Amino acid sequence: MPIWQRRPALPLLFACLLGAAPGGCESAPSQGPGHRAQALALSPSQELNLGEQAYQEVLKEYRGKIVSSGPAVAKVREIGTKIAKAAEIEPLQREINLRLKGYRFDWDFNVLQDDKVNAFCLPGGKVAVFTGLLPVATQNGRLSDDQLATVMAHEIAHALAHHASERIARAQKYQAAMDALNGALGHMEPGSRKQLIGLLGAGTQARSLAYDRQQEAEADHIGVFLMTFAGYDPRQAILFWEHMTAESARHGHPPEILSDHPSDAHRIAALKNWVPAAQNALAAYKAGHIAPAR
């Protein structure tokens, strides 16, 4: 029997801690995780299909550069599996307003040998971390599970929030997506193929197609909750993004993963609010103080 049925429930799920949108919880939740209307271009099955096709195209591009084993690969797969498991917690889905009914995620986690400071998660749960990101997620000379979980939870959040489907709708690329679903992705003109894959979330060579700031803030918010419920320290999220700020200053330009992200100061300020909210939510969950689903 679920824990939230065995214990007295609070009036609101986790006492309605914090929403991604300014002003916190709304009286009438809207479709998206940011408590806003969210127009989507793809059905659940189309999301899964297109994400798989795009993933295969990316892996084809990186043929010979897929890291098959080693400590980093083991960590990426262990952390990714824990985050994916946390995403299945129904009260958490309600807390961060995820809409996952009818959607399927066939999780896959890979490490790609590339100096880019980047990672992505395509629709359907296809995740890749670039080796160039790993040094940034290092603490005291060792790869930090908590900091790697920060960026992986952020990227996974994009897929859980259906941000790729929303971007296709915004960019009016529905027909291109339908063509790809009919098996044409690998035969598209290279520029069009790269653009579509970029919209899906793997815009590793097309940074103008990076997620917009609204979606990035939502992914930060969702990601902090996911990593916390997966057993990682959300305070390390602040440290990770501070490391990214230092990386930008060192190279004189933002790493790929920071393209179109919220400003460093705004992001870190938001995280400082969301971290205790996520910790309190986890404490409420463990104590069984969970409102039943309506």
Image (cartoon, rainbow, N blue to C red):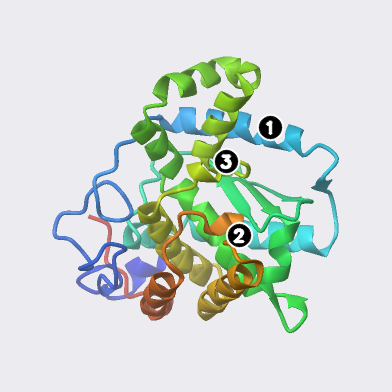
User: Is label 3 in a helix, a strand or a loop?
Assistant: loop
Separation of marks 1 and 3 at Cα, in angstroms: 18 Å
Circle 1 or circle 3, nearest the eye = 3
Quadrant for residue 272, please give it. Answer: bottom left
Q: Residue at x 24, y 66 (%)?
A: 22
Q: Is residue 173 above or below residue 244?
A: above
The kind of residue tagged 3 is Ala
User: Is label 1 in a helix, a strand or a loop?
Assistant: helix
Q: Is residue 267 above or below residue 126?
A: below
Within 10 Å of the Cα at label 1, are there few (<14), some (14-19), or many (20+) other Cα atoms?
Answer: some
The label on residue 206 is 3
Separation of marks 1 and 2 at Cα, in angstroms: 24 Å
Q: Residue at x 62, y 28 (%)?
A: 53
The kind of residue tagged 1 is Gln
- Residue 252 at x, y percent in the picture: 61, 66
Considering depth in this image, is 91 or 51 the residue closer to the camera? 51
Q: What residue did someone put label 1 on? A: 56
Q: Residue at x 43, y 79 (%)?
A: 279
Q: What residue did someone put label 2 on? A: 255
Within 10 Å of the Cα at label 3, are there few (<14), some (14-19), or many (20+) other Cα atoms?
Answer: some
Q: Which quadrant is the N terminus positioned in?
A: bottom left
Image check: 231 left or right of 45?
right
The kind of residue tagged 2 is Pro
Q: Is residue 20 above or below residue 275?
A: above
Visible residue check, residue 83: no
